[in-house]
Image (cartoon, rainbow, N blue to C red):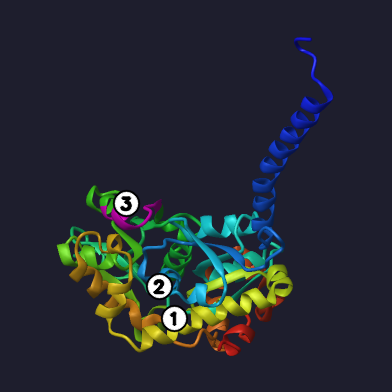
Amino acid sequence: MPGTATPRTSVRAGAAALAAVTALALPLASCRDSRSGGGVGGTSDRVKIMVGGIDKVIYLPAKLTERLGYFEEQGLDVQLLTEPAGAQAENVLISGDVQGVVGFYDHAIHLQTKGKCVQSVVQMADVPGEAEMVSAKKAGSLTSPAAFKGKKLGVTSPGSSTDFLTRALAVRNGVKTSDYTTVKAGAGQTFISTMDNGGIDAGMTTDPTIAKLVGTGKAKVLVEMRTEEGTRKALGGLYPSSSLYMDCAYVESHAATVQKLANAFVRTLRWIKQHKPAEIAAKMPADYAGGDPKLYEKAVGDSISMFNGDGLMKPEAAENVLNVLAQFSPEVGEKKDEIDLSRTYTTRFASGAK
């Protein structure tokens, strides 16, 4: 009879429906597993890492590790994602959408004041790798951070490490953070365009943006923090920056996976120390050069000394970051004596890297 299913067709229909439900459920299960660091079947080696600007030289080890094949050699399935600013990358980690962030260490300290625990498991750099750039049009009058008052200063976004560093430079030079205007200027071409159109007088950025600004004569380096000497002069000590930081609970529950990540990253840091800027630049995606391979090679050469080669945090450097943050951040200043630095980083995995 039309419209009436026989027992056999009912069974077939039921099987088809079950298959459809199963097919729908598998991607959902995969999504749930990826949030907890596990893949389908319970593997713990599928990892999503957010990078605070994947084409920035300061975060070069993330993509370079992938390009060298070191994640794969460790049996890791790593997906590198990117956000233009560290503050956004931090939020994605806290929400549980990724398992790690390649970003500035200072977020680990700042987040502890909010009751969150994240820690650097591989500390890649002892200095920021940043520079405060001043527009060529303003370079005559804006000659030091002491002249920040009344100026428009660019950062990638409020709450980012470029924002932290800008505040630190101001306060250390007698300027209140309320005396200047903070402008969200982004990075790369967005930053350059904002400076071109007069949206900012000066701003904090990284290579290859620094190299492009200097190369075109659009801006000059006002404060150099790509070197140890420049960083000590600007901030009174080392200021560890680029790191792989992760949620403390994830680190404890997925120690084997974290060790594999450390093995891969530390091997890359050693590789960087053994190769010339041209060789390093050649390993990166061609589009990172923005159509000018020689300029990109120069950008890599100007910043590459920032990477430490061993992935280890220096305790006195972490202490300096806390001291610097406490100078301008009310949250950190009020809770400075309560902050447990030992919870913001670990050398366990980098020390054990094979």
> 23 above or below 231?
above
| Side of 165 where 284 appears, left or right | left
Which amino acid type is marked by label 1?
A: Thr
| Residue occupied by mark 2 | 64
The stretch in magenta equals 183-192
Q: Do the residues labelled 1 and 2 touch (CB within 8 Å)?
A: yes
Residue plotted at (43% across, 56% down): 84
The residue at the far right in this view is 7
Which amino acid type is marked by label 2?
A: Leu
Q: Quadrant of the C terminus?
A: bottom right
| Side of 209 where 99 appears, left or right | right
How far apart, in angstroms, are the residues tagged by discs 1 and 2? 7 Å
Q: Do the residues labelled 1 and 3 touch (CB within 8 Å)?
A: no
For residue 253, which quarter of the picture? Answer: bottom right
How far apart, in angstroms, are the residues tagged by discs 3 and 2? 24 Å
Mark earlier in primary sequence (1, 3): 3
| Residue occupied by mark 1 | 268
Q: In which quarter of the image is the N terminus?
A: top right
